[in-house]
Image (spheres, grey):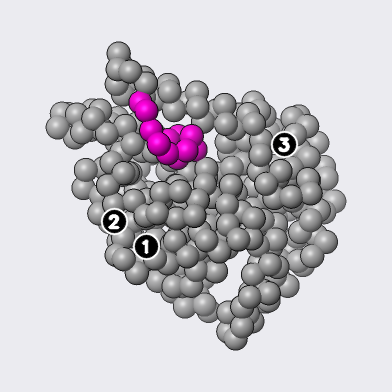
Amino acid sequence: MHTLAALFDLRPIDHLHHERTQRIHAVIRPGAQAHQSITSTGADYCLAHHALEGAEAAARAGDASTFDWYVAHPDAGATTGSVPTVVGARVVIAPTLADLPRSAISETPYYVLGPGTEPAQPHLSNLAADAYASAARAGFGDLLAAHAVVLCLLRTKNLSETLDSWTISRLPGTVFMDHVDDPVVLARDLIHEAGHNWLNDALAATACKISDTAHFHSPWKQTMRPAFGFLHACWAFPLTMLFTAQALNSTTGDLHRFLTAYLDQQRSLLASTAPDHARALELIRDDGLRHRLAAAHHQALAL
């Protein structure tokens, strides 16, 4: 894989997005014509999952009006207040972390778009747009176009503080993250979380079932992790390294020092995974997916 575009271009993912989106729309609006949208297939896929989760929760609660709203809005209302970016319209929200629900669908807090969704404040929307632009300039536009559609900005922190971010499998294409009010750092973390979403979709699209019996040492967690989590880390962190290496060319001052330290740290951590990563890749039966995971790891090791 000589380019990032080739790295992320896995055709089975496109088929997965199209087929699952159509199936979700058929469940929410049985008998209706296929929903026509100007958004990308990846964006439709993400928003359809929000509509499905919202409609299911409304049905279980006996909330007919909210259920009807989702039936009428198979994009979960995303066209209202979306933010234009270089990778397409994005939904940027900034709810209070303490107000995010927890339930059986996720071990971490999450947010489902719905009739009460409010867009993020203008300065956060602008920050997000700049972050998407920064990532796209570095070659990650295709990744974020399909796998970072809904951005949920959480706590504002300083560069010296730990930034928490995560995704959940029930809401593909959605990312939750702290930020430092800097578009380059936000772009780095967007790429990391979008990478997780990409790999989840890639595994599903290629019908790859990773054995849960094999475990490998994760230098990031300092513990033994199942192959699934280990491979996720050995994919997402190299992507952030590739981005950071490019971003260093256009940064100065504290930000440059922060990114330099980050890249140095990641080089050391990733190098320790090389023997185990080769063995873990043997669990991936799809040639195209295995080659992409190997290529990202190899390119990052060469930095």
Mark linked to residue 125: 1
Tell me whether the residue at label 2 lies in contact with that at label 1, contact meaning CB atoms closer than 8 angstroms: yes
Vertical position of residue 71 compared to residue 78: above or below = above
Residue 188: which quarter of the image? bottom right
Q: CA distance from mark 2 to mark 1?
A: 8 Å
Residue that carries the numbered disc 2 in the rendered image: 119
Q: Position of residue 235 (x, y in %)?
A: 68, 50
Q: Is residue 283 left or right of residue 113?
A: right
Instruction: Tell me the SS state at disc 2.
Output: loop
Residue that carries the numbered disc 3 in the rendered image: 289
Q: Residue at x 30, y 13 (%)?
A: 31
Which of pointers 3 and 2 indicates the residue nearer the eye? 2
Residue 123: which quarter of the image? bottom left
The quarter of the picture where the N terminus appears is top right
Mark linked to residue 161: none
In magenta, the rendered stretch is: 35-46
Viewer-closest of 84 and 171: 84
